[in-house]
Image: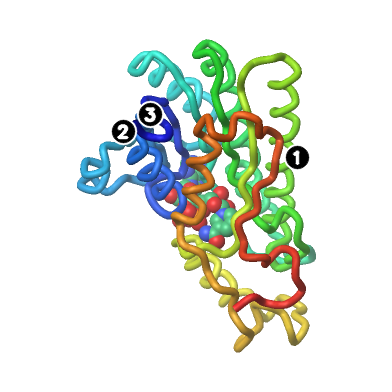
Amino acid sequence: MGRVQDKVVIVTGASRGLGWADAKMLSREGARVVATDVLDFDASSSKEFDVDCRHLDVSKEQAWADLVAAVLDDYGRLDGLVNNAGVLHVADPVNFDLAEWRHMCAVNIEGVMLGCKYALPAMIGSGGGSIVNMSSIAARSGLYFYSGYCASKAAVAAYTRAVAVYCAQNKLGIRCNSVHPGGIDTPINLNIAAELGDRMDQMRLPQNSPISPGAPQMRMGEPDDIAYAVLYLISDESKYMSGEELYLDNTASITAAVVE
Ligand SMILES: NC(=O)c1ccc[n+]([C@@H]2O[C@H](COP(=O)([O-])OP(=O)(O)OC[C@H]3O[C@@H](n4cnc5c(N)ncnc54)[C@H](O)[C@@H]3O)[C@@H](O)[C@H]2O)c1
């Protein structure tokens, strides 16, 4: 018997990185996982791990309506949602490009809002459920070279609290929590490195900035460090936990120094 045996769980942004680690972990522990992404999935690994892979752009409302309806048709219920899809653009507050800001808000905030909007009625019809929203240590730090990302991830945490209280006060049997990883070794960091490389000369960086050339680098976590937390939050083991921010960052968000 797995820790999430027979639960039907949607994971977004799941073709790689943290989302794929979550999907595999949940599937190993008995869940029936619907993994979604705008990117194509690697066909052989999705078969190997018994994960149902589907296309979803989280920023598109009709796509969410169609996906949740299809999951209810195919599985008859929905017990979990991991709103994991996310994007990061690098810029300080003076140089932020409005189109990139809107892209981050569309995926990171509106994607989470739409996921909750369509999952909640499906979970109510299933007798309860658990929603996990992927935030970041950026939600509470002043990493100004990630200024828009900080804003989007703080919005995820605030929205999570509102959804959690809505569910608790209406006795819906649905929980909602946010997860806040530090630096985890996934492809998103390649995108960051590429954008930083192009934009480094725009930034007013103090000498001890963690992104200055030659600065010590924080010790990265592994995707499963986050997937274990997601597993706990989707499982009934966390049945008394809702509206919380779960930080997994090896102290990075609470110290001024870089933890190597
Ligand atoms: N890796 C880290 O260091 C780190 C730290 C803190 C928070 N996070 C957050 O964790 C989540 C996963 O990030 P990751 O590190 O695995 O990055 P990643 O870039 O490897 O994966 C992100 C996934 O989201 C998908 N995606 C992007 N736009 C989408 C859209 N419109 N609709 C559906 N899917 C879309 C991408 O295709 C990709 O598969 C993100 O929300 C990210 O902000 C990551």
Query: Quarter holding the C terminus?
Result: bottom right
Q: Which mark is residue 52?
A: 2
Confirm if mark 2 falls within 8 A of ligand 1: no
Image depth: mark 2 or mark 3 in front: 3
Q: Which mark is residue 77?
A: none
Q: Residue at x 70, y 53 (%)?
A: 98
Residue type at mark 2 is: Asp
Q: Which residue is mark 1?
A: 158
- Residue 166, image quadrant: top right
**Mark 2 / mark 1, whichever is N-terminal:** 2
Depth check, front residue: 12 or 102: 12
Residue type at mark 3 is: Gln
As helix, strand or loop, the secondary structure at mark 3 comes to loop
Vertical arrangement, residue 121 with respect to residue 21, above or below: above
Vertical arrangement, residue 216 with respect to residue 193, above or below: below
Disc 3 to disc 1: CB gap under 8 Å: no
Crowding near the residue tagged with mark 3, few <14, some 14–19, many ≥20 C-alpha atoms within 10 Å: some
3D distance between C-alphas at marks 3 and 1: 30 Å
Residue type at mark 1 is: Ala
Numbered circles on residues, count:
3
Crowding near the residue tagged with mark 1, few <14, some 14–19, many ≥20 C-alpha atoms within 10 Å: some
On the rendered structure, is 110 left or right of 65? right
**Mark 2 / mark 3, whichever is N-terminal:** 3
3D distance between C-alphas at marks 2 and 1: 31 Å
Q: Which residue is mark 3?
A: 5
